[in-house]
Image: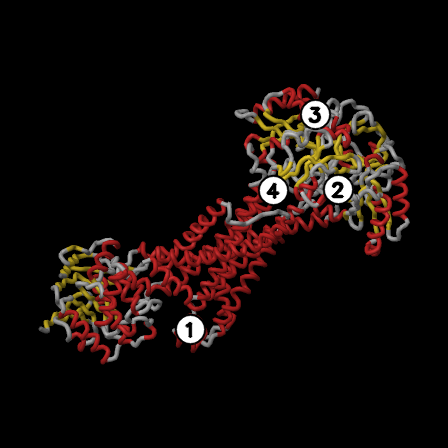
């Protein structure tokens, strides 16, 4: 029986090649996208789930709740880890790890001094770090690797890069930021691609004092929170997070007073949440993953709808076969399974193609999304379960309804070709299915337009400062003479318009914040102020506009402040009223007058609110030089800057970044999401068009006689075309009525993440329906025109 | 073998009610060859569909081999059909996607005959119908007469007790038509009961008895032997 099913299925499929190709192509694309989305989701869900005690591993994080102001920081004040170890009992192990990005590594004891700028930086880690988290060693003793000062552990990759091999790297010396030497005591297995810890160099925590005396001082650094100062704990068995949080509350009570004791909170964050909790440092929002999963469901649904539509439309052509089989004694169930086998053949073929397409596409997707996914059957039992499950779902979703329709045929009618549309579910069913497809396509189109519009707005809206033609280079040495030389030499270059030394450009992903004290008030305000350390050229270089007062005078140290509008508004003042008043940041002792107020500018991405901020000179904190250049000289000016920089800082590695590129990088996740939505929308629309083409082809054949008769009676070609156009326009409009509110709601949810955002206007909906209309018209047009232009004499004779 | 009493079949649409069979009563004995004649719309095909268990009557009784089958559900009807009844149609109704052999084999598949037996039985019947040399051809590659011989082969391969033939020569020329009628006569002589719907007086004369119908009921019965 099964052999017979396969045989007739194969012959049917080869006989109806066009429909088979449409179905296979639609299912292949839908399934390929589904596999890719599944791989992407599983990749993200697998982050850091390889650690042995993953369910007991937590990161201690900070919260701040003061009045209406709330803040979350993945970092801690550095002594918290030590306090947990010494004064609480909930943790089996505690490890502090403090990391710094973009560090200079040199190999001082090699024949030729080599320098490497490592963007992933270094981490000062306590020895227990490698007992809590499982990053296996290929060389070295886990119990001793970081237990003594000046020890370092690097990955296999870096060992090969620096010294040629892992063996050669052991016991060799690396120097960090031209300051401290470390002996390599262990080699880490290369980091897996599904961990959020990127550092490939771990050094003894005991050496933190060489890097930041303030952070290493456990007695006196309870105030400043550095976002990369992390503390991991392995909870004792049976200890709940609530118990740990209660103990952490005790630490707050012991080390903070007054309002700060009430506002500050340390809590434990489960390891599994680190990758997804965007309140902290995660940049993968789970809701985007679920949105992608929904898109996968949409794509599979669209492909299945195609299949159902075409299969039921074709069912009449198979009436005779079904009638005969019934006459010969076939049961309904046998006919149903026969059709399911046919569906299985098509779907299996589509799955094989889809897997190949997905496998081929993964490297491109990795490149596009900056991830390192792998798609392989080996050791991937989840994929081995997912694919057969998906196959079953697709087969039954696509095949069940047409199978039931076919099995239900009355043999007496089927044999006499007396079956009509109503016997195959009527045209209304296929209308509903086409509406479903159109609605899905339109929702995706609305989504793509909204995200693209928001991205265009984010990347092109006036941020309140000049971001074009400004290149930022690092300042590794802040001695006055060096900075002065550098400024003089750069200024002499043709094409350099302005130079400003600063901590960060106006908009940055990392910012320093501090409590703000106003007008001799001993208590800080309920909000903190963002600090921009910069010289007197900062305002003119970045085109920041003063709305009251003046710029601060040239100075190496802080004597005056410039604040922004939000700072003034938060105090409930008018800009002119704050001029001359004293404020203080970085503690109550840095009290200086405000001399100017600048118009608000965006100091983060449009995802965040504009913060109150204060700009003031403090040359010791300058780490960047912002150089405004004339873009006409771009070809000569960048090499010239690099040459001067290398001459001034021969011990360091040069790098540069354009401010507009930096701003664009704030929206990397959004741009990725947009690209994915665009790709999947395109595919959904294409699958829908395939189905539409198949359906209109079928409709044209079915209506051959009607068209012939109408033409004989005087109908023009446009009249005939309208038969098709009317049908599909109606369906499209109904789909739009369904898609528009859902699309509006979903996109409002998406835009909620942007503090500064576009409005979803009528234009977006008009554009989406027009796009669908045009696409549908192109799809339907050719086949309808052929039907309309057919000679009625021929078509009536055929009938 | 067949006892039909007061059989009724009414086709209803929203506005129209058409009585296809009106309290029809017929008996057919085992081994009989009965021809049913009548003008278009008199109910011949409806009767044949009900006799073939392809359709339900709306009233009356239909006893087949001593069993009341009028209200059998679909499963029982299919089961009864595949074991007892063979069909021959005017338009042959062969499955285009299957070869001659596969078409004839199909009823045996549905009755669960093992592959080796199927092969043997199909070859026997194809041989008997003198169509063996065409076993691997598709229906489109055969003449009308050959197609109908394949259809007859398919109808008899399961050794049914009853063959229902719906205008079996309607699409054939007289020579091929006669061949088919002789095949049916041979089968009848071997003991198979045959009920044939026809418009052809010539074909009807091959039968033992002619039942003439009008407006859903019998008007005359002519016994020919």
Q: In which quadrant will I find the C terminus of chain A? A: bottom left
Residue A778 position, x and y percent, is 55, 65
Residue A150 position, x and y percent, is 73, 32
Specify few, some or many for label 1: CA neighbours under 10 Å numbering under 14, 14-19, or 20 or more. Answer: some
Q: Say above or below: B109 vs A626.
A: below
**Inter-mark Cα distance, 3 to 4:** 30 Å
Residue A270 position, x and y percent, is 58, 32
Q: Do the residues marked 4 and 1 share a common chain?
A: yes
Q: Which mark is residue A151?
A: none
**Inter-mark Cα distance, 2 to 4:** 32 Å
Dots 4, 1 in contact, CB < 8 A: no
- Left or right? Give the position of A316 relative to A469: left
Q: Which mark is residue A709?
A: 1
Is A675 in front, or is A652?
A652
- Left or right? Give the position of A180 relative to A189: right
Q: Which mark is residue A507?
A: 2
Q: Disc 4 designates what residue?
A: A192
**Inter-mark Cα distance, 3 to 1:** 90 Å
The disc, 2 or 1, on the residue closer to the chain's N-terminal end is 2
Q: Disc 3 designates what residue?
A: A79
Q: Secondary structure at mark 2?
A: loop
Is A638 in front, or is B210?
A638
Specify few, some or many for label 2: CA neighbours under 10 Å numbering under 14, 14-19, or 20 or more. Answer: many
Q: In which quadrant will I find the N terminus of chain A? A: bottom left
Q: Do the residues marked 2 and 4 share a common chain?
A: yes
The disc, 3 or 4, on the residue closer to the chain's N-terminal end is 3
Q: Do the residues marked 3 and 2 share a common chain?
A: yes
Q: Disc 4 vs disc 1: which is toward the camera?
A: 4
Can residue A121 be seen?
Answer: yes
Q: Secondary structure at mark 1?
A: helix
């Amino acid at each position: 029986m099964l052999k017979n099913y396969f045989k007739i299925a194969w012959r049917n499929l080869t006989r109806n090649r066009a429909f088979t190709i449409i179905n296979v192509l639609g299912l292949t694309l839908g399934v390929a996208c589904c596999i890719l989305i599944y791989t992407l989701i599983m990749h993200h869900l697998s982050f850091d789930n390889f650690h042995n005690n993953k369910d007991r591993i937590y990161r201690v994080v900070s919260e701040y709740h003061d009045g209406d102001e709330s803040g979350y920081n993945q970092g801690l004040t550095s002594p918290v880890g030590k306090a947990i170890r010494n004064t609480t009992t909930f943790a089996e192990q505690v490890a502090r790890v403090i990391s710094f990005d973009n560090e200079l590594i040199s190999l001082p004891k090699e024949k030729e001094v080599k320098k490497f700028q490592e963007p992933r930086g270094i981490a000062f880690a306590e020895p227990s770090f490698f007992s809590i988290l499982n990053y296996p060693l290929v060389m070295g003793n886990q119990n001793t690797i970081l237990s003594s000062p000046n020890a370092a552990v690097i990955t296999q990759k870096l060992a090969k890069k620096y010294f040629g091999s892992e063996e050669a790297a052991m016991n060799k010396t690396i120097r960090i930021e031209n300051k401290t030497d470390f002996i390599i005591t262990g080699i880490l297995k290369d980091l897996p691609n599904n961990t959020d810890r990127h550092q490939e160099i771990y050094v003894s925590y005991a050496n933190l004092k060489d890097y930041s005396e303030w952070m290493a001082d456990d007695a006196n650094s309870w105030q400043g929170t550095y976002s990369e100062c992390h503390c991991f704990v392995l909870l004792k068995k049976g200890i709940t997070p609530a118990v740990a949080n209660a103990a952490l509350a005790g630490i707050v009570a012991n080390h903070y007073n007054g309002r700060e004791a009430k506002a500050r909170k340390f809590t434990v964050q489960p390891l599994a949440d680190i990758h997804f909790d965007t309140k902290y440092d995660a940049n993968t929002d789970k809701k985007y993953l679920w949105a992608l999963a929904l898109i996968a469901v949409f794509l599979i649904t669209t492909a299945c709808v195609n299949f159902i539509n075409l299969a039921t439309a074709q069912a009449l052509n198979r009436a005779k076969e079904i009638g005969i089989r019934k006459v010969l004694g076939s049961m309904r169930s046998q006919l149903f399974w026969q059709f399911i086998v046919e569906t299985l053949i098509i779907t299996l073929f589509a799955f094989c193609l889809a897997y190949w397409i997905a496998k081929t596409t993964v490297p491109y997707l990795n490149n596009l999304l900056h991830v390192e996914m792998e798609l392989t059957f080996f050791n991937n039992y989840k994929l081995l379960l997912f694919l057969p499950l998906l196959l079953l779902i697709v087969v039954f979703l696509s095949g069940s309804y047409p199978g039931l329709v076919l099995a239900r045929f009355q043999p007496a009618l089927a044999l006499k070709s007396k079956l009509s549309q109503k016997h195959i579910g009527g045209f209304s069913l296929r209308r509903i299915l086409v509406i479903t497809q159109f609605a899905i396509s339109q929702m995706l189109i609305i989504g793509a337009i909204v995200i693209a519009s928001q991205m265009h707005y984010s990347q092109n809206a006036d941020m309140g400062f000049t971001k074009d033609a400004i290149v930022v280079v690092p300042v590794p040495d802040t001695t006055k003479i060096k900075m002065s030389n550098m400024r003089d030499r750069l200024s002499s270059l043709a094409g350099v318009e302005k130079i400003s030394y600063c901590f960060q450009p106006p908009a940055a992903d990392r910012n320093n914040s501090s409590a703000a004290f106003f007008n001799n008030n001993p208590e800080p305000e309920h909000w903190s102020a963002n600090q921009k350390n910069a010289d007197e050229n900062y305002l003119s270089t970045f085109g920041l506009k003063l709305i009251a007062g003046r710029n601060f005078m040239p100075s190496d140290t802080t004597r005056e402040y410039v604040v922004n509008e939000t700072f003034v508004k938060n105090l409930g003042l008018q800009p002119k009223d704050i001029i001359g008043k004293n404020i203080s940041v970085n503690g109550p002792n840095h009290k200086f007058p405000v001399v100017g107020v600048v118009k608000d500018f965006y100091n983060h991405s449009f995802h965040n609110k504009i913060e109150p901020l204060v700009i003031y000179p403090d040359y010791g904190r300058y780490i960047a030089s912002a150089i405004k250049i004339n873009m006409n000289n771009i070809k000569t000016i960048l090499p010239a800057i690099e040459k001067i920089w290398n001459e001034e800082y021969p011990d360091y590695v040069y790098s540069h970044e354009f401010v507009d590129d930096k701003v664009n990088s704030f929206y990397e996740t959004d741009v990725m999401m947009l690209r994915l939505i665009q790709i999947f929308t395109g595919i959904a629309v294409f699958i829908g068009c395939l189905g539409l083409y198949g359906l209109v082809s079928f409709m044209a054949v079915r209506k051959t006689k009607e068209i012939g008769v109408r033409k004989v009676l005087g109908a023009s070609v446009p009249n005939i075309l309208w038969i098709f156009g009317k049908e599909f326009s109606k369906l499209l409009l109904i789909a739009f009525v369904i898609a528009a509110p859902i699309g509006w709601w979903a996109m409002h949810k998406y835009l909620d993440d942007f503090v500064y955002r576009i409005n979803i206007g009528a234009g977006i909906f008009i554009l989406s329906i027009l796009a669908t209309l045009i696409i549908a018209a192109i799809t339907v047009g050719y086949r309808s025109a052929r039907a309309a232009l057919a000679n009625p004499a021929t078509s009536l004779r055929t009938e | 073998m067949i006892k039909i009493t007061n059989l009724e079949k009414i086709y209803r649409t929203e506005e129209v009610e058409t009585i296809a069979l009106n309290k029809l009563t017929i008996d057919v004995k085992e081994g009989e060859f009965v021809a049913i004649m009548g003008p278009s719309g008199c109910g011949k095909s409806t009767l044949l569909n009900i006799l073939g268990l392809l359709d339900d009557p709306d009233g009356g009784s239909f006893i087949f081999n001593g069993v009341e089958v009028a209200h059998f559900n679909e499963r029982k009807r299919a089961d009864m059909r595949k074991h007892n009844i063979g069909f021959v149609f005017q338009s042959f109704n062969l499955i285009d996607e299957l070869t001659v052999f596969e078409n004839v084999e199909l009823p045996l598949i549905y009755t669960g005959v093992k592959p080796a037996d199927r092969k043997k039985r199909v070859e026997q019947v194809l041989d008997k119908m003198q169509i063996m040399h065409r076993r691997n051809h598709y229906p489109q590659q055969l003449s009308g007469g050959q197609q109908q011989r394949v259809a007859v082969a398919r109808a008899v391969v399961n050794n049914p007790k009853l063959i229902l033939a719906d205008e079996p020569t309607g699409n054939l020329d007289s020579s091929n038509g006669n061949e088919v009628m002789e095949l049916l006569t041979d089968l009848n002589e071997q003991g198979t009961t045959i009920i044939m719907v026809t418009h052809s007086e010539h074909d009807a004369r091959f039968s033992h008895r002619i039942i003439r119908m009008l407006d859903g009921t019998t008007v005359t019965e002519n016994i020919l032997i």
